Image (cartoon, rainbow, N blue to C red):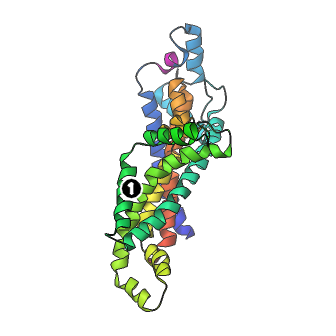
Amino acid sequence: MRSFILTRTLLAAPTILGVVTLVFFLIHMVPGDPVVLMLGDYATKQDITQMRRELNLDRPLAEQYGLYIENLVHGDLGTSVYYKKPVLKIVMERFTYTLALTVFAMLVSLLVSVPLGVISAYKQDTWFDRLTAGTSVLGLSLPNFWIGIILILIFAVKLNLLPVAGAHSASSIILPGLTLATGMSAITIRMIRANMITAIRHESFTANLARGIDVNRALFVHALKATLIPVITLVGMQFGLLLSGAIITETVFSWPGMGRLLVDSVMTRDYPLLSGTVLVIALIYVAVNLVTDILYYAVEPRMRKTS
């Protein structure tokens, strides 16, 4: 197990270096002078020169890249021009909000999609299966911002049960969490249903029932275990995307997470904050993929035999 984790981590290292390099050069390829964009058209030449020196933009590109890598090694992503605080500190503060929202949405999604997907497969071609399939298609078709607005109108405006926006109380996470969980549940239900149908048709499922195993145990333990690999893939991808910042949902609900921070950094033309946020988002996605690979190894015995 340790050797597998070490191997996957070493293989992820070139990817991380590639991400760091790509973020650096993409930011530098943005049209226009970033210093002028940050300071505005009325900035003096002295202000522009000073800012360019602070951001090391007065040095050759190769030297800038070397300093960028050196600072990253020491955990320095620079200082935000708008907030006047270290970028890493700002990003980590916002990351806690995104992590809380992601975990809540993922838990709601799994609590809904796993039983519905399993039962829908077991009751294939019945009214329950058709209703679940139709609801899943609807959930996939509706954009997140529309779902969020409808939830706000119903639960915040009409019923006055939940906060409209912000993160001022524990209940503030419910509406944005349900918004994200809707689309996630729709995809996961379809994935689980498709794989469960194959598992139920397998002779091992019939054999379990013949041995007197309860149908619920045969479904939710034995058959569901056989579908874990594709489900882990899907959930890992969704988790990575949400941790990377659900930009639209966080903007609709004014949720102070990574997605909202990314939008704010663009709006305020905060060059160091934009660069740091994009980099952390990319690294989070790489880390989630690494964790997903480790979960494969833990769940699938055949991987342990071949490694």
Q: Please give the name of the residue rendered at 37% of the width and 69% of the height, measured from the top-left corner.
A: 195
Q: Residue at x 67, y 38 (%)?
A: 168
Q: Nearer the viewer, residue 155 or 298?
A: 155
Residue 282: in sight, yes or no? Answer: yes
Residue 116: x, y in percent? 44, 65
Q: Residue furthest bottom?
A: 211
Q: Is residue 20 magenta?
A: no
Question: Which residue does the image show at 65% across and 32% down from the upper left?
Answer: 86
Q: Position of residue 159 (x, y in %)?
A: 58, 41
Q: Secondary structure at mark 1?
A: helix
| View extreme (left): residue | 125
Whether residue 206 is situated above or below residue 45 in the rendered picture: below
Q: How many marks?
A: 1
Q: Quadrant of residue 122?
A: bottom left
Compared across the picture, whether 171 is left or right of 292 comes to right
The dominant secondary structure in magenta is helix
Is 107 or 148 nearer to us in this picture? 148
| Residue 115 in the image: above or below residue 105 | below
Hey, what amino acid is under mark 1?
Thr
From where the camera sits, is residue 307 visible?
no
- Please rate how many residues cluster around mark 1, counting C-alpha atoms within 10 Å: few if below 14, some from 14 to 19, many from 20: some
Q: Residue 302 at x, y = what percent?
A: 43, 76
Which stretch is magenta? 33-37
Quarter holding the N terminus is bottom right
Circle 1 sits on which residue? 135
Image vertical order of residue 271 relative to residue 201, above or below? above
Q: Residue 223 location, x and y as percent?
A: 43, 77
Using the image, determine if residue 135 lies above or below residue 54.
Answer: below
Please give left or right for residue 170 compared with residue 17 in the image: right
